[in-house]
Amino acid sequence: MTTDIQSILKKLGVQADNAAYSTGSNWGGTSNTEKLESYSPVDGKLIASAKVASTADYDAIVIKAQVAFKEWRTVPAPKRGEIVRQFGDALRENKEALGTLVSYEMGKSLQEGFGEVQEMIDICDFAVGLSRQLYGLTMHSERPSHRMYEQWHPLGIVGIISAFNFPVAVWSWNAALALVCGNVCIWKPSEKTPLTAIACQHIIAKVFKNNDVAEGVCNLVLGDRVVGELMTNDNRIPLVSATGSTRMGKAVGAAVGARLGKSLLELGGNNAIIISEHADLDMSLIGAVFGAVGTAGQRCTSTRRLIIHESVYDAFITKLVKAYGQLRIGDPLDQNNHVGPLIDTDAVEAYLDSIAKCKEEGGNFVVEGGVLSGDDYASGCYVKPCIAEVQNDFKIVQHETFAPILYLIKYKTLDEAIALQNAVPQGLSSAIMTLNLREAEHFLSAKGSDCGIANVNIGTSGAEIGGAFGGEKETGGGRESGSDAWRAYMRRQTNTINYSNILPLAQGIKFDL
């Protein structure tokens, strides 16, 4: 395993000895001796170490980005799109290697690792088309011989703070759109997954070099919370896009807001699937199980709660318990396994603490949890997906635990189910399983789900890049990826042109000299 991974690192050009990277060069920064050590949750082994950027390293990267922006913004958007297209092709060439590294460094299944790289490819394809569609509007002026319209300009430097659970895809969502919009990027990846970030930086750096793109357009800075704080407090960065916990997002939003910057926040989820009495239970089972145990419950869109109609409750729980009994837990690089490890032992402790708190509040576990031991689970990061019957107002149910813990709640009426689903602080993803058209439309109406994503006969997890991704309430309100999410990366400018030989004022105001 180690030999294979080291070969993959070599193939991807990952030499984890630098603290900061800028397109056009591999610049190592200062002689800061502090390092990030990346251990795989798959087997507990050290993969490689990477230097932590100092304040001086960070500042040098920002200066490079400022200079690069002045040139990059003048490149026609379709030409910027062509370069992003080439990046997508480079990802296609490296999909197997990068997807495997994602799986090994983060712990998600190999299929999910490949799927994450495919998301990167998809957003590049989307961004290429978008590069010819950065549309403004035209408006009629109240003044004769005047023309009004709006246009969109790039912001400048876009700071990207990403989380460990999608170590590369969420960066690409932001970077691909920001780049075609004419911005430059500085990326601070999770300190838990630095190697996948370095790999991505090398891939895009080659593409930029082949196109003679100015150094500093796409940058990577490795570090912990300190680097993130430098970014969020930096007036030179007009937009900070941050993905992570609600606690982290509140800190980022406050810091960026205090300097009147813009923040794009993608934070926690506490997602529910409503299983209606009119549901196809077999189809519902697939959505519920994958949503709950995929990525070992470490997606912001993971299914945390099942709200099940009382008439089908017992029948569905029987199916669910049987399905959990068939789950294979182990090495995520083995495609026969369904569930891999949690990211680290801190996540395991949070999982165990949540189980204990659930039991203290009266939760009844129909599938017990626990930590797996033995040679196959030597990293100490493998846990059992578990299921508990609860009340929605339990404190632990109101909290997002990044682990495969699924809560069961019974309901009588659809309005009650929707109220239960909405009665949490978070508002990311939601779903209803029903073959009843009226139920489906009610769920999607203004009286229905209060989440940014609402699905019918699809689970909460696995969004496509064509739609805007994000949620409400403590999920932060941000939107990334598809639809018109590109507007977050640009500034709007309204233009009025007077082509007459007089200067009339709006609202009929007279000002004669």
Image (spheres, rainbow, N blue to C red):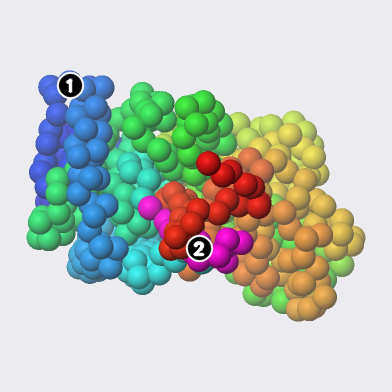
Q: Nearer the viewer, mark 2 or mark 1?
A: 2
Tell me the kind of residue under disc 2.
Answer: His
Magenta residue span:
139-153
Residue 370 versus residue 446: which sits nearer the camera? 446
Give the answer, above or below, for where 146 lies relative to 167.
below
Residue 146 is labelled as: 2
Q: Earlier in the sequence, mark 2 or mark 1?
A: 1
Residue 344: x and y in percent read 41, 37
Q: Is residue 324 left or right of residue 433?
A: left
Residue 61: x and y in percent read 21, 34
The span from disc 2 to disc 1 (Cα, nearest Å) is 59 Å
Residue 512 versus residue 209: which sits nearer the camera? 512
Determine the residue positioned at 63% across, 56% down. 452
Residue 279: x and y in percent read 75, 74
**Is residue 140 on the magenta stretch?**
yes
Within 10 Å of disc 2 (Cα), the crowding (few <14, some 14-19, many 20+) is some
